[in-house]
Image: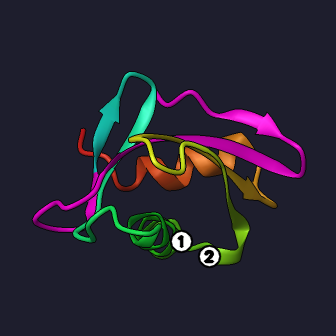
Amino acid sequence: MIDLQPGKGGTILPVHAQPGARRNGITGIHAGRLKVAVTQAPEKGKANQALVRLLAELLDLKPSQFTLLSGETAQHKRFLVAGIEPAELRAKVAKHLRP
């Protein structure tokens, strides 16, 4: 289960990023974090931008709703997803996880 926390004006989403992957997508859960793969290499924030675009697209949200709180250069990241409650975000994520 993903450790979603309420944040100021939204929900804090912990992510385990996999830059430089073969394809983009949510690949599962790792240690309470949403595991997300992006093909973009981790250069000058490009992987973080790709991660935000992918999450926004898959979760039917706007990229502007995502703010990186921590982990700019690390695999473990924390995003504030504005305007959404933890239960609603959990339901959107669950649609992309394999049973």
Residue 57 horizontal side relative to residue 65, left or right: left
Q: Position of residue 21 (x, y in %)?
A: 16, 60
Tell me if mark 1 has few (under 14), some (14-19) or many (20+) residues whose alpha carbon lies within 10 angstroms of its own: some
Q: Amino acid at mark 1?
A: Ala
**Picture residue at 63% right of the left edge, 33% below the top:** 4
Q: Position of residue 40 (x, y in %)?
A: 27, 71
- The quadrant the N terminus occupies is top left
Q: Is residue 86 above or below residue 64?
A: above
Q: Are marks 2 and 1 in contact (CB under 8 Å)?
A: yes
- Residue 82's quadrant in the figure? bottom right
Label disc, if present, on residue 63 of the rendered structure: 2
Q: Position of residue 58 (x, y in %)?
A: 43, 69
Q: Nearer the viewer, residue 63 or 88?
A: 63
Kindly report the distance in space between the C-alpha atoms of the residues bearing marks 2 and 1.
5 Å
Q: Is residue 6 above or below residue 41?
A: above
| SS category of the residue bearing label 1 | helix
- Residue 68's quadrant in the figure? bottom right
Q: Nearer the viewer, residue 94 or 61?
A: 61
- 30 falls in the magenta region: no
Judged from this view, the residue extending furthest toward the right is: 8
**Circle 1 residue:** 56
Q: Magenta stretch?
A: 1-26
- 19 falls in the magenta region: yes
Q: Amino acid at mark 2?
A: Pro
Residue 27 horizontal side relative to residue 1, left or right: left
**Picture residue at 27% right of the left edge, 57% below the top:** 19
